[in-house]
């Protein structure tokens, strides 16, 4: 075999090796970018999950139904972000189980039932069963002879002015 043929073969092999290194480098760079993007998406997913927990705590603290709406908005956002993460990971050859969606659905249903139960109980002292109880309690208290003491205590606690009626009962 002539030197010219050997050089052509070696040059061709070198060129193929360089192309193989370039192709594998491109593949691994794309794979690394996908995984980096997945990590960023996972961070956003974590923040959304923390916002769900925050909405739950805000409802329990303030007893306001607007936090159920915020919870549902964040749950929908969470599912969208999870779907984007799944797509990114699928492009990298990673498949995650669907357990997270099932757990979120369970969390959402449980929280909705909790809000419904609180609404039935009463979100304030004037609504629901709690409101009925307080109304009935006031009726019972007012029918007692010691109502003057209760009224006096309420007036003192609220800081309102006290006047004494001719009957001796503070008003």
Image: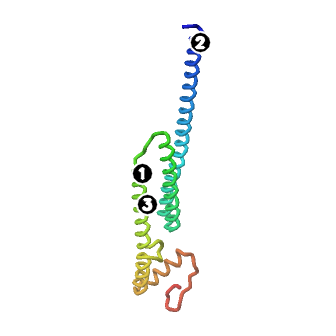
Contact (Cβ within 8 Å) of mark 3 with mark 1: no
Near mark 3 (Cα within 10 A), the count class, few <14, some 14-19 or many ≥20, is some
Horizontal relation, residue 156 to residue 137: left or right: right
Tell me the distance, in whole angstroms, between the alpha carbons under discs 2 and 3. 70 Å
- What secondary structure is marked by label 3? helix
Percent x, y of residue 27: 54, 33
Residue extending farthest to the front is 1
| Above or below, 123 relative to 79 | below
Q: Nearer the viewer, residue 168 or 130?
A: 130
User: What distance separates the C-alpha of mark 1 from that of mark 2?
Assistant: 59 Å
Colour style of the rendered protein structure: rainbow
- Residue under the image location 44 percent in, 72 percent down: 119
- What's the mark number on residue 108? 3
Label count reads: 3
Q: Position of residue 155 (x, y in %)?
A: 53, 79
Which labelled disc corresponds to residue 100?
1
Compare marks 3 and 1 and give the one earlier in the sequence: 1
- Find the residue positioned furthest to the bottom: 166
Q: Which label sits on residue 9?
A: none
- Which sits earlier in the primary sequence, circle 2 or circle 3? 2
Q: Quadrant of the N terminus?
A: top right
**Circles 1 and 2: CB atoms closer than 8 Å:** no
Q: Quadrant of residue 142?
A: bottom left
Mark 1 secondary-structure assignment: helix
Q: CA distance from mark 3 to mark 1?
A: 12 Å
Q: Nearer the viewer, residue 98 or 104?
A: 98
What residue is rendered at 42% in x and 69% in y?
Answer: 116
Rendered location of residue 94, percent (x, y): 45, 41
In this orientation, which residue lies closer to the viewer: 47 or 78?
A: 78
């Amino acid at each position: 075999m002539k030197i010219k043929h050997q050089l052509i073969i070696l040059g061709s092999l070198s060129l193929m090796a360089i192309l193989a290194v370039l192709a594998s480098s491109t593949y691994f760079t794309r794979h690394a970018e996908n995984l980096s993007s997945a990590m960023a998406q996972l961070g956003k997913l974590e923040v959304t999950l923390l916002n769900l927990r925050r909405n739950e705590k805000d409802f329990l603290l303030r007893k306001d139904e607007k936090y159920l709406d915020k919870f549902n908005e964040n749950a929908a956002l969470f599912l969208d972000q999870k779907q984007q993460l799944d797509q990114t990971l699928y492009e990298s050859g990673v498949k995650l189980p669907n357990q997270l969606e099932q757990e979120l659905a369970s969390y959402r249903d449980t929280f909705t039932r909790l809000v419904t139960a609180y609404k039935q109980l009463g979100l304030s002292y004037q609504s629901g069963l709690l409101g009925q109880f307080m109304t009935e309690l006031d009726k019972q208290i007012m029918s007692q002879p010691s109502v003057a003491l209760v009224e006096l205590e309420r007036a003192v606690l609220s800081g309102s002015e006290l006047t004494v009626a001719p009957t001796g009962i503070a008003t």
